[in-house]
Image (spheres, rainbow, N blue to C red):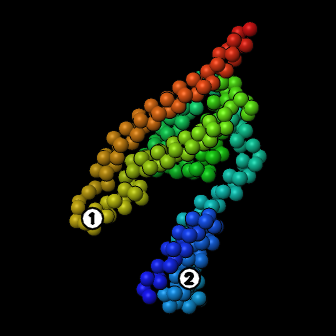
Amino acid sequence: MEWLKLIGILIIILGFLFKFDTIAVILVAALITGLVSGLDFTEVLSILGKAFVDNRLVTLFMLTLPMVGLIERFGLKQQASKLISNVKRVTAGRLLTLYLIIREIAGIASIRVGGHPQFVRPLINPMVQGALRTRYNLTDATIDAKDIEKLKAEASAMENYGNFFGQNLFVGAAGVLLMVGTFSSLHIKVNAIDLVLASIPVAVITLLLIWIKNMMLDRYFNKKYGRNEVKTHESNNN
């Protein structure tokens, strides 16, 4: 009967497999797990409520989502795209590399720029798309939809790279302190500064590799849309 207490794991797996609502699946799994473990309904609700209150700070980021939705609704994407269209010689790859640099520098200073929903989706993504459209004089009819999806993925990847490899560049970062505490519990003496110094080469190597990757992305776009750029220059000269 002890195995029956693991039914919550099965419910979560099946819920994700059939793409049911995530929060509903987790709540149902928690309720059923508590009930089969011998707890009554009120005890389960009490445990869930206490866990939510104890970890309520984790959900504070949700307060920013309505604000982001409003500024998107009133033209943030269009303004970001318009801004980048006025910058000469900018490419999608260069802009992605610049954001990665900014993201890693922000990690050194322990500055949180907002992540995917608050920063990448409403600001970086339209700017990168605007850079591609401006450089090659592309419209919705001439740009490949697959390339738009590619740029969305690349913009999200820059956030992931910068956050993952940049967060350990700050001595007081949660990840660094967690590792120090874990090593200490294993009787291994490690200082936070040592971990930061060990993280610097990894962050630099990541930056160089992604810079090369973004250069290859620009070459891909130049090979695919380069004729549009030539035609634009010729029409401007005429």
The residue that mark 2 highlights is 32
Q: Secondary structure at mark 1?
A: helix
Q: Position of residue 187 (x, y in %)?
A: 22, 65
Residue 71, x across and y down, in percent: 72, 48
Viewer-closest of 161 and 172: 161
Tell me which amino acid carries mark 1.
Answer: Ser
Q: Position of residue 221 (x, y in %)?
A: 58, 28
Residue 231, quarter of picture = top right
Crowding near the residue tagged with mark 1, few <14, some 14–19, many ≥20 C-alpha atoms within 10 Å: few
Residue reaching furthest to the top: 238
Q: Are marks 2 and 1 in contact (CB under 8 Å)?
A: no
**Quadrant of residue 2 within the rendered picture:** bottom left
Question: Which residue is at a point 27% across and 64% down the rendered structure image?
Answer: 184
Regarding residue 86, the answer to whether it shows in the image is: no
Query: What kind of residue is marked 2?
Result: Ile
Q: CA distance from mark 2 to mark 1?
A: 38 Å
Q: How many marks?
A: 2
As displayed, is residue 31 above or below residue 121?
below
Name the residue located 39 percent from the left edge and 51 percent from the top edge: 168
Q: Residue at x 30, y 46 (%)?
A: 198
Q: Residue furthest right?
A: 74
Residue 237 occupies which quadrant of the picture? top right
* Viewer-closest of 141 and 118: 141
In the image, taking residue 150 as reference, residue 192 lies left or right, namely left
- In the picture, the quarter occupied by the C terminus is top right
Left or right for 235, reference 42:
right
Label 2: which secondary element: helix
* 157 or 87, nearer to the observer: 157
Placement of 187 over or under 102, stated as above or below: below
Q: Identify the residue under disc 1.
A: 184
